[in-house]
Image (cartoon, grey):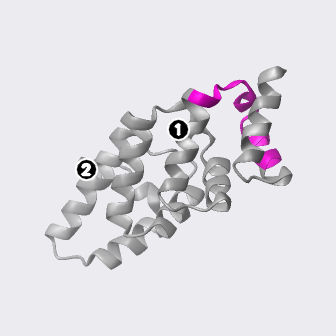
Amino acid sequence: YRNAYLVIGFLQEKGLEKPQIKKIISCLPKLLTYRIKTNLEPKMSYFLELGYSVSDFVDIISAQPLVWNFALNSTVRPAIEALREILGSNHNVVSLLKAFRLMPSRSIINHIVRNVSFLRARGIPIETIQKRILQTPAAFMRRHEVF
């Protein structure tokens, strides 16, 4: 139970309010057992350093609780950076992550990148692609061969 109190204290320290903490923990109760220094702190700091608000962070984590299970440097960071490059803004990345409940893995990001490249090579404007990704993200997460 000691770690649970530490985790809750950490989240409060970072500016989360009780309803936000409740929302995150109800999505992933196991979060209360995670290590602050090696898991929670680096990931939360990463999202906040990118300019996401605490509210955005809560929305992302509530929709994507498995973010806590992925390695920051090998999965989360490359996925978020690739999505920002394709979608053009943090706002669009938040919208996508909130709408699609599967945390994009390295292979899914590769599918998105290939499919976007495929459409760009055929003259489709990036703005149109961005709209379509936000409307039907699952379509862009398919293997390129079946896209």
Residue 26 position (above or below residue 138): above
Q: Quadrant of the N terminus?
A: top right
Most extreme residue toward the top, as rendered? 1
Q: Residue at x 62, y 60 (%)?
A: 56
Residue 63 position (above or below residue 128): above
Asked if the residue at tag 1 contacts the one at tag 2, i.e. Cβ–Cβ closer than 8 Å, the answer is no
Most extreme residue toward the left, as rendered? 121
Q: Which residue is mark 2?
A: 144
SS category of the residue bearing label 2: helix
User: What is the x, y in percent for residue 64?
Assistant: 59, 46
Q: Residue at x 23, y 53 (%)?
A: 114
Q: CA distance from mark 2 to mark 1?
A: 33 Å
Q: Residues within 10 Å of mark 2 (few under 14, many from 20)?
A: some
Q: Residue at x 37, y 70 (%)?
A: 88
Along the line of sight, the residue nearer the viewer: 7 or 120: 7
SS category of the residue bearing label 1: helix
Q: Quadrant of the C terminus?
A: bottom left
Along the line of sight, the residue nearer the viewer: 147 or 110: 110
**Which region of the structure is painted magenta?**
21-37
Q: Which residue is mark 1?
A: 42
Please state if 109 lies on the left or on the right of 90 as rendered: left
Q: Which secondary structure class fits the magenta region best? A: helix
User: What is the x, y in percent for residue 35?
Assistant: 64, 25
User: What is the x, y in percent for residue 96?
Assistant: 51, 61
**Amino acid type of the residue tagged 2 in the rendering:** His
Along the line of sight, the residue nearer the viewer: 44 or 20: 44
- 23 in the magenta segment: yes
Camera-side mark, 2 or 1: 1
Q: Residue at x 36, y 53 (%)?
A: 81
Residue 40 position (above or below residue 85): above
Residue 13's disc is: none
Please state if 134 lies on the left or on the right of 28 as rendered: left
